[in-house]
Image: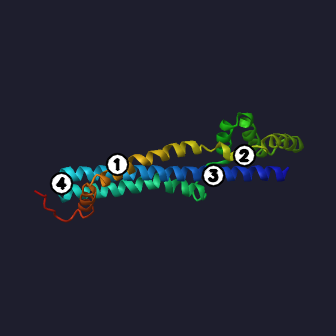
Amino acid sequence: MKKDYQFLIQKLNTFIKEYYKNLIIRGIVYCIILTISALLAFSLIEHFGFFNTMVRAVFFWAYCAFSCVIAFWFIITPGIKMLSAKEGLTHKEAAQIIGKHFPSVSDKLTNILELKSISEGNQSIIEASINQKISKTKPLHFNHAIDWGKTTYYAKFILIPVSIVVLIMLSGNSRVLSESTHRIINYNTKFEKPA
């Protein structure tokens, strides 16, 4: 019984790590999309506005803050949870996620976890019930419950900002991005507006 239960817990722990790995990869995708899009927006606004040092400073620090917040939210937080340094997904929550994907065992996993925590009553009946439920979950690969499709779906959107950058570069207007980005990075320097 203990071996089966430990095997189930090991499968749940593996699922939790893979779940967070998926969130981290999706977070990287979100960060790439959002940071390139923000850089494009700030560079194009600066190119057409040719703003003073104060506005460029706001652009620079807003971009830095924005990049840090989305990196923390989408990459660092799931990474910390995956390493169990911060309270993350519990076995019961993992069982509920798996149960949504595999309706045939939706209640069995949570029942196993609840039965294991019962200290009163006939232990042999409880163990027999746990073993019966575990046997029905053994053939399932819990990692199939992870939604990698959503991650690959969002990965396609990286092409939009990257395509815009490539089109600007190929059109011979690379200075639109390079010069305005240079002015934003060097926001304390005064630049003369070209005639």
Residue in the image at 74% along x and 37% along y: 105
Callout 3 amino acid: Glu
Residue 85, image quadrant:
bottom right
Dot 3 falls on a residue whose secondary structure is helix
Location of mark 4 (residue): 50
Callout 4 amino acid: Phe
Q: Position of residue 115 (x, y in %)?
A: 78, 42
Q: Could you give the CA–CA distance between mark 2 and mark 4, rounded to whole angstroms? A: 57 Å
Label 2 environment density (alpha carbons within 10 Å; few <14, some 14–19, many ≥20): few
* Of the pair 34 and 70, the residue shown nearer to us: 34
Residue extending furthest left? Answer: 195
Q: Is residue 83 left or right of residue 166?
A: right
Mark 1 and mark 2 residues within 8 Å of each other at the beta carbon = no
Whichever of callouts 3 and 1 sits on the residue coming sooner in the sequence is 3
Location of mark 3 (residue): 18
Callout 1 amino acid: Ile
Location of mark 2 (residue): 141
